[in-house]
Image (cartoon, helix red, strand yellow):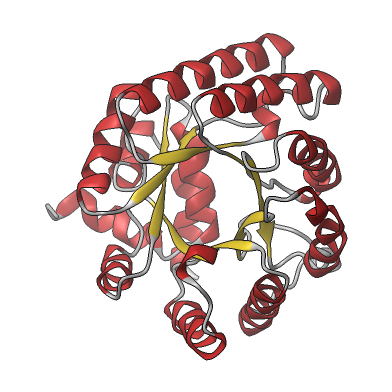
Amino acid sequence: MFNRLLANVLPYMPKKLIWVFSKRYIAGETIDDGLKACRELNKQGIEVTVDLLGEFISTIEQAEENKNKYLEIIERFTSEGIVGNFSLKPTMFGLLIDKEICLSNIEEVVKKAVEKKNFIRIDMEDSQCVDRELEIYRKLQHKYPANVGLVVQAYLRRAKNDLISLNSIHSNGAPLNFRLCKGIYIEPKHIAFKEYDEVREHYLDDLKYMFGQRMYVGIATHDKFLVDSAIAIIQEKNIDKTKYEFQMLYGVTPELRNSIVKQGYKMRVYVPFGKDWFGYSTRRLKENPKMATHIVKALFFRG
């Protein structure tokens, strides 16, 4: 109760206070900050997916600006030899303003990735966006099958049916490429599973289905139970290491991350940066109120 109260209050506190919490989970505000963080991870044998922060824009001009920023990011990161790919949120490109403009903007970014022999992951956002984002993914995946992937949120009640439906587009040669995560947005009970064990159960059910359909899976979780369970499934079914990877957020559970790497599994870290860090940070806080206590401690104790 105390943590939840803090989590609700902290977003209204000065940004300098929230940055005490955020700097662990965000690479910084600039492209150079992002590059520095990615180089450090690459040195540890960890690949990255790069994300410019920002979502739910209000004007088409912002969408154009975000598109141009992504084109610059892809150019910089690929030219400087970063081992990784890129993630984006469709609401940054105008999804809720003009769906066709959004598709056009994202396609330009995908074309840039194709030019650089790279890859774009389309993040899945809250439930109002899901159908539109699936439609955009289908159109782009059909044209660029090896260069576009999607996020699947296991807590959504529709997730398994979406996977079954998406499996019908597998005929174009390249395996479907998904990041499987629990899901972070606050949704009503009729849309999303709410109980902790229930979400875990559906996560593993989705994972087994994806392996069974020979999809490429980014196993995105910081839940040690799910990590251990995924490894057990991989070993039981003798899944080839070219068919999956583990994924984690920048700055989260580094000990668990390192233990996975030491076992010889491929790891990719989601590296967010940008000036719009505040919304990302407060969402993390609402997702995990226990972090609020760490913020308060950080104000008084170095490290």
Looking at the picture, tell me which residue is in the foreground, 69 or 125. 69
Res. 191 image quadrant: bottom right
Q: Position of residue 248 (x, y in %)?
A: 43, 58
Say left or right for 102 vs 278. Answer: right
Q: Position of residue 118 (x, y in %)?
A: 51, 35
Say left or right for 297 vs 153. Answer: left
Q: Position of residue 100 (x, y in %)?
A: 85, 22
For the question of whether residue 30 can be seen, the reply is: no
Res. 115 image quadrant: top right
Give the residue at the far left of this rendering: 302
Looking at the picture, tell me which residue is in the foreground, 185 or 87. 87
Looking at the picture, tell me which residue is in the foreground, 146 or 275. 146
Q: Is residue 41 above or below residue 97?
A: below
Q: Quadrant of the C terminus?
A: bottom left
Q: Residue at x 35, y 43 (%)?
A: 22
Q: Is residue 112 above or below residue 192?
A: above
Q: Is residue 95 above or below residue 170?
A: above
Give the residue at the far front of this rendering: 173
